[in-house]
Image: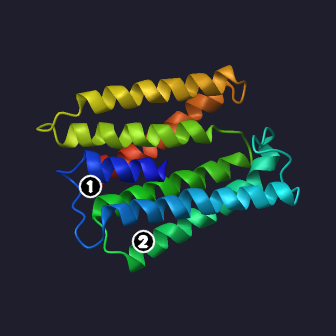
């Protein structure tokens, strides 16, 4: 999801985000590497070493270690982007908000199995919605509607696959939406 958020902010919200120091493709590639590829490789290693029994991680107890590692990766990524890259404040805010979502999600995993998929997609919905409200001069209607439809499809698929209960899906949506909306509406 961080990669998708970066792609959206760099290429879809061009009036807001100005990327001048680095090639935008480089930034997207770095986010993809640090928030997707490296965590994915760590998950494969956890599976090979039998720290997790499957990639679905059906039990909440099985999600604690992988989510903790992913939280660590996101914190390191955010810290390095803050220190080493001269990126637009909106991009840095997105990374901070996403990292906060992942940390809260990881903390909740000790008690309940909240939908990480819904947390991620609702964060994107929240960012697009906050931008639409803050910058009404730009037409965000299609983007808002499209993101809501995609979030509905993701939530429906989580329920259809019996991966989560409706409460877990709804809580995931509330978590991602509230953190990301608050960040982009009040801090941007």
What residue is at 47 percent from the left and 29 percent from the top? Answer: 151
- Judging by the rendered image, the residue that carries numbered circle 2 is 81
Q: Is residue 166 visible?
A: no
Q: Which mark is residue 140?
A: none
Other residues around mark 1 within 10 Å, as few (<14) / some (14–19) / many (≥20) = some
Q: Quadrant of residue 126?
A: top left
How far apart are the alpha carbons under marks 2 and 1? 18 Å
Q: Position of residue 158 (x, y in %)?
A: 64, 28
Q: In the rendered structure, which disc, 2 or 1, sits on the residue that comes first in sequence?
A: 2
Residue 88 shown left or right of residue 77 in the figure: left
Residue 1 shown left or right of residue 40 in the figure: left
Q: Quadrant of residue 137?
A: top left
What residue is at 66 percent from the left and 20 percent from the top? Answer: 160
Q: Position of residue 159 (x, y in %)?
A: 65, 23
Q: Residue furthest right?
A: 50
Tell whether label 1 touches label 2 (CB within 8 Å): no
Q: Residue furthest left?
A: 137
Residue 58 shown left or right of residue 67 in the figure: right
Q: Which mark is nearer the camera, 2 or 1?
A: 2
Q: Is residue 185 depicted above or below 65 in this figure? A: above
Q: Position of residue 141 (x, y in %)?
A: 24, 28
* Camera-side residue of 111 and 118: 118
Question: SS of the residue at dot 2?
Answer: helix
What residue is at 45 percent from the left and 62 percent from the top? Answer: 29
- Judging by the rendered image, the residue that carries numbered circle 1 is 188
Other residues around mark 2 within 10 Å, as few (<14) / some (14–19) / many (≥20) = some
Question: SS of the residue at dot 1?
Answer: loop
Q: Quadrant of residue 132?
A: top left
């Amino acid at each position: 999801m961080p990669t998708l958020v970066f792609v959206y902010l760099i290429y879809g919200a061009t009036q807001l985000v100005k990327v001048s120091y680095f090639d935008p493709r480089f930034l997207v590639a770095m986010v993809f590497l640090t928030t997707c590829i490296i965590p994915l490789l760590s998950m494969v290693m956890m599976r090979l070493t039998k720290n997790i029994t499957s990639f679905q991680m059906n039990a909440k107890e099985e999600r604690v270690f992988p989510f903790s590692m992913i939280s660590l990766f996101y914190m390191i990524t955010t810290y390095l982007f803050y220190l080493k890259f001269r990126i637009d404040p909106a991009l840095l805010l997105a990374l901070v908000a996403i990292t906060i979502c992942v940390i809260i999600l990881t903390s909740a995993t000790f008690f309940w199995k909240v939908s990480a998929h819904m947390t991620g997609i609702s964060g994107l919905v929240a960012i697009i919605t906050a931008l639409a409200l803050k910058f009404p001069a730009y037409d965000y209607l299609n983007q808002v509607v499209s993101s809501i439809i995609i979030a509905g499809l993701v939530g429906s698929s989580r329920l259809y696959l019996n991966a989560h209960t409706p409460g877990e899906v709804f809580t995931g949506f509330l978590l991602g939406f509230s953190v990301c909306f608050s960040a982009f509406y009040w801090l941007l």
